[in-house]
Image (spheres, rainbow, N blue to C red):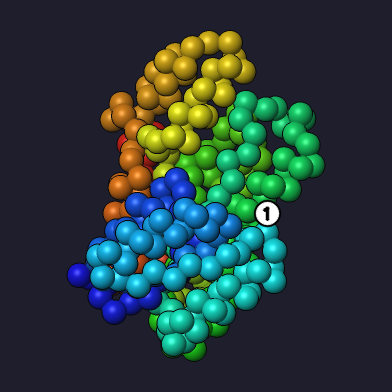
Amino acid sequence: MILNGRNALLTGAGKGMGPAIARKLAAEGADLACLGRDLEALRALAGEIEAIGRKCFIFAADLTRAGDVEQAVALAIAQFSGRLDILVNIAGARGPVDKKAWELTETDLDEVIDVNLKAVLRVVRAALPSMIARRAGRIVNIGGTHGRRGRALRSVYSASKWGLRGLTRSLAREAGPFNITVNSVSPGPIMGERLKRTIAESAAARGISPEAVLAERTAETALRRFAEDSDVAEAVLFLVSDAARNITGQDLAVDAGALA
C-alpha cells in the first residue's frame, strides 16, 4: 500500500467522484478525514472505509463559511495528532447550464465562485501551516477541462476553473520551498448521474433529445468515450504518491482526449 501510514483530508468526498477518490486513497493505506455538509453521505462512505480497516473521520462544514472551515480543519488535524500529509479539494459547484453570460444573476456568480475557488483557498489556508511545520505535504485540487479552454454557456463555471488552475500554480510556488507539492486534476465529462442531469438540462434548453446531446459530447473526445470517476481517482493517487515527488504546479487532464 503506497500510502500506508499517511493522513488525508478531503472535501466533497460524499458525492460525485469524491467516493471513488476516497476509496482509492484508503485502499492504498491512507486514513481519511472528510469535510462536507451532507453528513448522511459521509457516514455511508465512512462505513465503507472503516470496513477495509482504515480510519475515516467526518466533520460538518459549510465550505463557504470561513469559520466552519477553520474549525473543521483544526479538528481533523487534531484527530491525526497534528500530522496532515495529503489534502484533496474535490468539492465543487456546477452552476447554471446553457445560460449566457449576460443572463447570469449575482446568485449564479456568487455560488460558483465561492465554492469552486474561494472555498479551496479557505481550506488550503487552514491546512497548509500543519504541512509547512513538517516540511512535507501533497495538495491536489480538482479542476476541470473548462478551465483549459473557453466554453460557451458555461462562462462562470469556466472562469472558476481557470482561476483554480492559476491558484494551484501560485500555491506551488509558495509551498515549494517547504517540500509541498500542489497540483490539479482536470476531469472532462465523467460518466455518472451528474453528467446525465447536465445532458438532460441541456437537451431541454435546446429543444433536442438527450441522445443527441450525448452524441455531440462524445464526439468531442479523441477516444469517443467519457472518463470515469475511477480514472480521476488513479490520477489523484499518482499525484499524492512518492512517484510524483518532483511534480508540482501542473494540471493533469483526465478527459479521454477531449483536449487533444
Residue 228: x %, y % from top left: 33, 40
Give the residue type at disc 1.
Answer: Asp
The quadrant holding residue 206 is: top right
Residue ID at (36%, 56%): 21
- Image position of 186 (left or right of 239): right
The quadrant holding residue 155 is: top right
Residue ID at (40%, 36%): 192
Residue ID at (61%, 30%): 97
- Image position of 129 (left or right of 134): right
Residue 174: x %, y % from top left: 54, 75
Residue ID at (63%, 39%): 95
- Please tell me which residue lies in front, 204 or 236: 204
| Number of marks | 1
- Please tell me which residue lies in front, 205 or 151: 205
Placement of the N terminus among the 4 image quadrants: bottom left
Where is 121 relative to 253, above or below? below
- Please tell me which residue lies in front, 247 or 137: 137
- Image position of 164 (left or right of 229): right
Which residue lies under the disc numbered 1? Answer: 114
Q: Can residue 252 be spotted in the picture?
A: no
Q: Can residue 68 be spotted in the picture?
A: yes
Where is 137 relative to 139, above or below? below
Residue 75: x %, y % from top left: 54, 79
Residue furthest to the right in view is 106
- Mark 1 residue crowding within 10 angstroms, few (<14) / some (14–19) / many (20+): some
The quadrant holding residue 156 is: top right
Residue 141: x %, y % from top left: 48, 59
Where is 19 relative to 257, above or below? below
Placement of the C terminus among the 4 image quadrants: top left
